[in-house]
Amino acid sequence: MTFRTIDIALPIAIALLSLFTACGSQTANQPTVSAESLTPQPGPSAAAEPPLAPSPQMPDLQAEIMDERGKTSHSPLILVDFKNFTYPLPRGWQHQDGDEIALVNGRLQPKIRDIHEEMSPEERAAARAERRIGMSYVTTKFFDVDSDGLDEAAVVLKVETGGTAIPQLVYIYTWKDDKPELIWPFRTGDRADGGLKDLRVENGELVVELYGQDRFILGQTETNKITGDEEQLCCPTYFTRTFYKWNGRNFQLQRKRLTFETTNPSAPPLENHGDTMNDPIKSKKYLENL
């Protein structure tokens, strides 16, 4: 009886030993899985990522135009209601209402018509013909630009395009024959692209500041960008200061055009910078010396 039990148990023990040995061999060839490894782990750089910085605040490009300088005057122009007034459009501008714009309560609504690819040529032409720029009153500044002892009025209007652009128009009026007489209308660009920064009078000269490098008024419009003056519309890094003198018939540009950094306006300005950057030889030499 004893020998039979041993004879039966021995082969079973050997078989079980072989089974455990085989399982142990398979387990050793497989990676170890722990409870920690089953828990989702952050990526290798997640802990090192810095917190998101707040978005920078957009600069107020109209702050100087909208301040309280030049808001009072003894000129009869102070009594003119420029919010309900008719203005000529700049040279080259026109729409179906003619070459003038009439503000009512400081505004003329734009007429906006979308143009789609599905439209026929006739429908597109009709939609374009119905479009009209709008206009809104911004402010009026009073200062003596012709040194006659009586203030003129500089009326600033914003062109309403239906978008975020801020092109503007400036109308300078003097008082003559008991009514306002327009002596200089001009257009300015959009924000960093020649947009209006400031208007004032210093030492008998009209000072005009436009955003951008070497941007100034030529005739009735702002000049174009110079070589190398590319930046975001929202956030100009340069502005140009120019000086104009009334000669009895028109305003003439005086002295040098000065380009300043917006963040450091006390630093020495660049003088007539467009003359340098638009010349291949001068611009190459200038860039090499930076």
Image (tube, grey):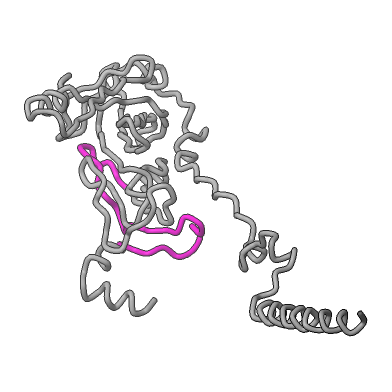
Specify the segment rendered in magenta: 244-272
Q: Position of residue 14 (x, y in %)?
A: 77, 84
Q: Residue at x 27, y 18 (%)?
A: 102
Q: Is residue 211 visible?
A: yes
Q: Residue at x 33, y 49 (%)?
A: 193
Front residue of this view, candidates 229 and 41: 41
Any magenta on residue 87? Answer: no
Farthest-out residue, front: 1
Rendered location of residue 117, percent (x, y): 16, 34
Taking the magenta stretch, the answer to whether it contains residue 256 is yes
Q: Quadrant of the C terminus?
A: bottom left
Regarding residue 146, the answer to whether it shows in the image is no
Q: Is residue 41 left or right of residue 120?
A: right
The image quarter in which residue 205 lies: top left
Measuring 20% from the left and 37% from the top, which residue is drawn there?
Answer: 249
Q: Quadrant of the N terminus?
A: bottom right
The x and y percentages for residue 115 are 19, 30
Q: With respect to residue 90, does 24 lie above or below? A: below
List x then y, in percent, for residue 199: 40, 41
